């Protein structure tokens, strides 16, 4: 018996070492190679450039402004959908996350269609404003970044203990004092996590600044321009190092920031019976949800109008020619196939890797498990644009260069952390004695995984697949440096079509990505419901 246990322990250690080697090979080695290629001349070129300091200032200021707006807006929406008795909550919740299903560059293009010099609303309302520059970057960044923050805060409010609020009502404590003494301490960790992750997400995005920034440069935009346009990889590595800083700070803050709020209460997430929200409170919640929902739907409505317009902005007659041209003569169908292959392959392989890694870290704990867990989580601290450049430096000229395989690898590295964490949390919630019971009955670990853990965690596996697939369909960051004409995903065509003034085709591409992601989300939802009935 002791020999069997020792054999299993050695086997588990060997498997963990193999997993660690895979993770190190996917991310750590490319990053080390990228930073090892830096020279003093590269730093001097960047730091003495006349464009760097203005771009750095723009990045910090605009990202900070957009982050504040996102956090305030996200908290208001979370409060409205989770704390106020309003109807259509499910509808609002779906609409509010739709912006997550299209690339950031599409949000910038949507603003151009609506508020550009020949924008639909600009001409309709006779507006005399310029959406290009700082204003457009802030608005586009808010549209792109608020759904993840909203999900984080809504989830926190959904499971907050209501007993403290009921006691405060009995004691006659005012609303402002309740907010300061109960709500804010409880939301401290979610708010900090949402703020840092939002700031990191905005600073590392080049899609919105590229599309609508005009002459206003950000560090991510400079990195894209100099690597893609001028092939200055040394400068790109310096920009990558700079963009890595806020992402690493966000990751470290999230890891170190332990939640101590409301841990002493018995959980009661329901409102007290007989309590009804005041009419003004409900009106405010409806107004906020409706206003943001309209703002979220406007770009999608603009894409639809533009995709079926004969000649924007002169002739808005309905036509299907744009779809035929985009998907046919302009190669959209082939690029869509590339995206589907990349997304499906990444989702399958990433889900498998996340599942296996989470099992070994959550169900076979050891010091090595802790190292593996931290390594898997650290991937979320690497911005996609930095990861993509590190892959260029590492794999340029190799047999992987210019293949679909390298795009799958970089996407899996970019997005694996969140699915891994989903599965890790699911495994941690399961009875810790299951393996011991199985061993007593003579059931091996592989069979326990196949017959017990996998069937129980199927909804989580489906969510992992969905997360990886959707993000691969809409990403433009890591893949932009690695894709060739034959392997290019369809999301990268948006900027190309916009540059060529083919706005109708860019709108078609955005709608295609949205449609594919919505269909996938619907299928995953149906699958999860069937799993719940079994």
Image (cartoon, rainbow, N blue to C red):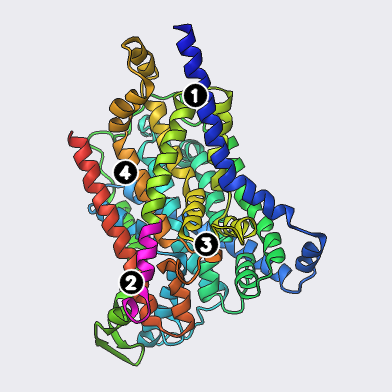
- Label 3 neighbourhood size at 10 Å, few (<14), some (14-19), many (20+)? many
Quick check: 474 left or right of 394? left
Residue underneath mark 1: 12
Residue at the location (31% across, 29% down)?
450
- Separation of marks 3 and 2 at Cα, in angstroms: 21 Å
- Label 4 neighbourhood size at 10 Å, few (<14), some (14-19), many (20+)? some
SS under mark 3: loop
- Separation of marks 3 and 1 at Cα, in angstroms: 36 Å
SS under mark 2: helix
- Separation of marks 1 and 4 at Cα, in angstroms: 26 Å
Out of 410 and 246, give the one closest to the viewer: 410
Sequence order check: which comes first, mark 4 or mark 3? 4
Sequence order check: which comes first, mark 3 or mark 1? 1
Is disc 1 in contact with disc 4, using a CB cutoff of under 8 Å?
no
What range is drawn magenta here? 326-342
Residue underneath mark 4: 462
Q: Is residue 297 visible?
A: no
Query: Residue 477, labelled with which disc?
Result: 3
Out of 84 and 497, give the one closest to the viewer: 497
Sequence order check: which comes first, mark 2 or mark 4? 2
- Location of residue 259 with respect to 382 vertically, above or below: above
């Amino acid at each position: 018996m002791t020999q069997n246990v020792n054999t299993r322990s050695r086997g588990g250690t060997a498997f963990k070492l193999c997993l660690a080697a895979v993770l190190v090979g996917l991310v750590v080695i490319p990053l080390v190679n990228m930073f090892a290629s830096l020279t003093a001349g590269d730093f001097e070129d960047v730091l003495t450039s006349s464009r760097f300091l203005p771009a750095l200032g723009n990045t910090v200021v605009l990202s900070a402004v957009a982050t504040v707006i996102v956090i305030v807006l996200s908290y208001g929406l979370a409060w409205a959908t989770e704390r106020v008795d309003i109807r259509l909550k499910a509808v609002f919740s779906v609409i509010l996350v739709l912006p997550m299903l299209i690339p950031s560059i599409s949000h910038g293009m949507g603003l151009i269609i609506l508020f550009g010099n020949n924008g639909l609303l600009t001409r309709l309302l006779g507006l005399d404003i310029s959406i290009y520059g700082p204003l457009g970057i802030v608005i586009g960044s808010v549209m792109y970044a608020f759904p993840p923050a909203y999900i984080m805060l809504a989830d926190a409010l959904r499971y907050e203990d209501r007993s403290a609020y009921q006691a405060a009502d009995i004691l006659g404590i005012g609303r402002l004092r309740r907010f300061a003494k109960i709500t804010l301490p409880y939301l401290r960790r979610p708010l900090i996590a949402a703020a840092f992750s939002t700031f990191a997400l905005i600073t590392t995005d080049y899609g919105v600044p590229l599309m609508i920034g005009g002459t206003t440069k950000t560090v991510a935009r400079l990195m894209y321009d100099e690597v893609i346009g001028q092939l200055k990889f040394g400068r790109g590595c310096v920009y990558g190092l700079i963009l890595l800083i806020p992402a690493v700070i966000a990751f470290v803050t999230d890891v170190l920031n332990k939640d101590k709020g409301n841990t002493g209460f018995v959980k009661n997430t329901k409102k007290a019976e007989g309590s009804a929200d005041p009419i003004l409170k409900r009106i405010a919640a409806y107004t906020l949800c409706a206003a943001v929902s309209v703002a979220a739907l406007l770009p999608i409505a603009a894409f639809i109008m533009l995709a079926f317009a004969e000649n924007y902005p002169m002739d808005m007659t309905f036509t299907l020619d744009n779809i035929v041209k985009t998907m046919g003569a302009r190669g959209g169908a082939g690029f869509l196939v590339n995206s589907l292959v990349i997304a499906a392959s990444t989702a399958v392989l990433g889900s498998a890797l996340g599942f296996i890694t989470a099992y070994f870290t959550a169900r076979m704990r050891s010091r090595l498990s802790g190292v593996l867990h931290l390594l898997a989580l650290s991937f979320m601290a690497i911005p996609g644009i930095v990861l993509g450049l590190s892959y260029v430096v590492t794999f340029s000229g190799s047999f992987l260069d210019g293949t679909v395989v390298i795009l799958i690898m970089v996407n899996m590295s970019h997005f694996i952390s969140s699915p891994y964490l989903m599965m890790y949390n699911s495994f941690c919630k399961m009875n810790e004695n299951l393996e011991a019971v199985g061993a007593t009955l003579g059931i091996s670990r592989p069979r326990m995984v196949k017959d017990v853990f996998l069937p129980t965690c199927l909804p989580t596996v489906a969510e992992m697949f969905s997360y990886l697939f959707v993000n691969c369909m809409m990403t433009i960051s890591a893949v932009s440096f690695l894709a060739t004409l034959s392997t290019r995903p369809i999301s990268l065509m948006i900027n190309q079509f916009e540059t060529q003034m083919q706005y109708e085709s860019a709108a078609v591409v955005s709608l295609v990505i949205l449609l594919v992601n919505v269909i996938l989300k619907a299928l995953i939802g149906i699958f999860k419901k069937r799993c719940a009935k079994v």
